[in-house]
Image: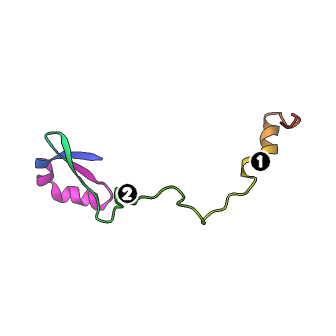
Amino acid sequence: METVNIHEAKTQLSKLLEGVSKGQPFIIAKAGKPVARVVSIDAPEAGQVKRLGFLKDQIQVPDDFDRMGEDEILSRFGLNDAPAP
């Protein structure tokens, strides 16, 4: 994320806001310390983003998922005759 000082933000506000509208937020800093983050109005807020379980009820994982292709994998390593644990 780009960081700009207050003077640069004032002189290039139109350009910076055009970037924000294209998904490029920026930070305004005063004396090198961040004071504000400028993001698109429709950007999700920090606590609003939910990642865990975002595909729940949209996909199904087979019960044997961890064993899918097991025979082929073992044969490629020459282990298809190995005793099962």
Q: Residue at x 35, y 55 (%)?
A: 46
Crowdedness near tag 1: few (<14), some (14–19) or many (≥20) residues, C-alpha within 10 Å: few
Would residue 37 appear left or right of 70 to someone viewing this image? left
Is residue 9 located in the magenta-colored stretch of the structure? yes
Q: Residue furthest front?
A: 47
Residue at disc 1, secondary structure: loop
Query: Dominant secondary structure of the magenta stretch?
Result: helix
Q: Residue at x 77, y 41 (%)?
A: 73
Q: Which mark is residue 47?
A: 2
Q: In front: 16, or 56?
A: 56
Q: What residue type is disc 2 on?
A: Gly
In this rendering, the count of numbered labels is 2
Q: Position of residue 44 (x, y in %)?
A: 36, 61
The quadrant the C terminus occupies is top right
Q: In front: 82, or 52?
A: 52
Would residue 18 appear left or right of 57 to someone viewing this image? left
Crowdedness near tag 2: few (<14), some (14–19) or many (≥20) residues, C-alpha within 10 Å: few
Would residue 12 appear left or right of 64 to someone viewing this image? left
Q: Residue at x 39, y 60 (%)?
A: 48
Q: Quadrant of residue 24?
A: bottom left
Q: Which residue is mark 1?
A: 69
Magenta-tinted stretch: 8-27
Q: What residue type is disc 1 on?
A: Gly
